[in-house]
Image (cartoon, helix red, strand yellow):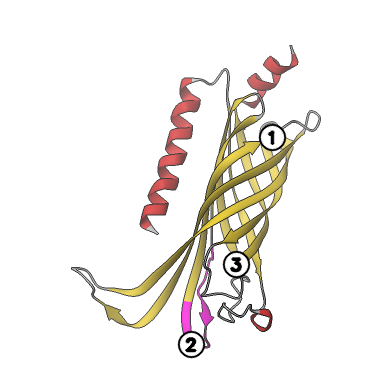
Amino acid sequence: MRKSAFLFSFFLGTLLLMTSAAQAQTQTDLAVGASTVIGTKAENAGTTFFPQNAGGGLFPTASADFLFFKHFGIEGEIAGRAERTISQGFLPYRTTFYNFGALYSPPLGKHAALEVNAGAGEEVARFYQPTLLCPFFTCTDFTNTSHLLLAFGGGVRAYVWRQFFVKPDFRFYHIQNNIEFSSNHATRIGISVGYSFGRAKSATKSSH
């Protein structure tokens, strides 16, 4: 999980540096929001999966994207469950989804833009234990399981004031070997607020 958080921070920092170096040609969108995840119910679990719904609860989200070639670019997102929930009737846990990938974002008139994205990432489930675990030189009260995933989604940035926008969106996750939960897929739906850097310059340039 620390590795994934580092990668996301590095990704975000890289976007900001690249934007500072080429503001006249690029657009960067930063957003934070809230969402929920819809997973397969426990009673509908597949034969090779554990009957535990991966969804439910509040998932705060943060995202960043960088448009550098017309309406094409790259994007990254993190969505993590705000509070612990219970697995197997007694084991507290939290899930976090990370993904990075390609983005296509054409304008929808003067005050909105479409987002279509696809990429890859990771689902991390942190299970909290009643006793400390000391496998090496440090002790923790949790164990992590992680699975690679493919992510596909979309949304609409609606500009409500200058470069500030509201964005309803969704993300479909296909998760490999997700045996701790009821199926190999889940869907995140939510809404974010954000700001676009460089949008006015990009729009002016594309209009000529």
Q: Seen in the image, is 64 located left or right of residue 4?
A: right
Mark 1 neighbour class, 10 Å CA radius: few under 14, some 14 to 19, many 20 or more: many
Q: Amino acid at mark 1?
A: Ser
Mark 3 neighbour class, 10 Å CA radius: few under 14, some 14 to 19, many 20 or more: many
Measure how far apart labels 1 and 3 are at the Cα level: 28 Å
Q: Seen in the image, is 10 located left or right of residue 38?
A: left
Q: Residue at x 70, y 21 (%)?
A: 203
193 to 129, vertically: above or below: above
Q: Seen in the image, is 46 located left or right of residue 180?
A: right
Label drawn at residue 184:
3
Q: Nearer the viewer, mark 3 or mark 2?
A: 3
Residue in the foreground of this view, choosing between 93 and 204: 93
57 to 116, vertically: above or below: below
Label drawn at residue 90:
2
Q: Residue at x 72, y 35 (%)?
A: 161
Q: Seen in the image, is 162 located left or right of residue 77?
A: right
- Which comes before the other along the chain, label 1 or label 3? 1
Q: Amino acid at mark 2?
A: Phe
User: Please, what secondary structure does the residue beneath circle 2 have?
Assistant: loop
Q: Nearer the viewer, mark 1 or mark 3?
A: 3
Please name the residue that numbered disc 1 is placed on.
Answer: 105
Q: Position of residue 100 (x, y in %)?
A: 53, 45
76 to 163, vertically: above or below: below
Measure how far apart labels 2 and 1 are at the Cα level: 44 Å
Q: Is residue 58 magenta?
A: no
Measure how far apart labels 3 and 2 are at the Cα level: 23 Å
